[in-house]
Amino acid sequence: MSATSNEWLVMIQDRPDVLKTRYASSPSHIANYKPIREQGQLIFAGPMLGAHPQKAGDPLNIVGSVLVLSLDSLEDVWRLLREDPFNKAGVWDLEKTTVTPFKSTVRTPFWSNFRDLLSLASKNE
């Protein structure tokens, strides 16, 4: 990564009826992003929801993913998306993905809630 990296807002829709595959692929998907998060290339990421749960403990209505990446080029973004375990498992619909140049002006410290998300995943199985 060069000092002139650009930021990209990425919105990816899931294919229909892939929630079980998404949850099964989540550990490898999360592990895949650890190195780029540590290098400062992953600004934030998380699931897109069709709606918020009505009450605590309700399953998440996950319909896709949102990422903000700090990478040099659009080609770098697409390469990363194509190599992602969610894409390889058929979760993401890359044809319906939008990648938009972006510049974040406010950032908060990283706080991992992956354990909470994985806990909810087990409730959906």
Image (cartoon, rainbow, N blue to C red):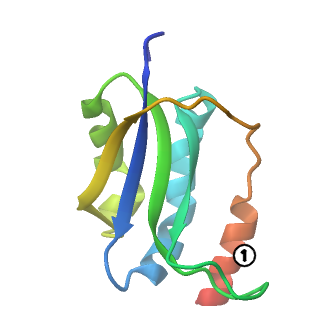
Total numbered circles: 1
Q: Is residue 14 left or right of residue 33?
A: left
Q: Quadrant of residue 37?
A: top right
Residue 83 location in percent, x, y? 33, 48
Residue 105 location in percent, x, y? 61, 29
Q: Secondary structure at mark 1?
A: helix
Residue at the (33%, 37%) spot, across then down? 77
Q: Is residue 45 above or below residue 54?
A: above
Q: Is residue 28 above or below residue 73?
A: below
Residue 42 location in percent, x, y? 54, 37
Residue at the (69%, 78%) spot, across then down? 120
Q: Mark 1 = which residue? A: 119
Amino acid type for the residue under numbered disc 1 = Ser
Q: Quadrant of the N terminus?
A: top left
Q: Is disc 1 surrounded by few (<14), some (14 to 19) or many (20+) residues within 10 Å?
A: few
Residue 125 location in percent, x, y? 58, 90
Q: Quadrant of residue 93?
A: bottom left
Q: Is residue 30 left or right of residue 109?
A: left
Q: Is residue 82 left or right of residue 3?
A: left
Residue placed furthest toward the front: 105
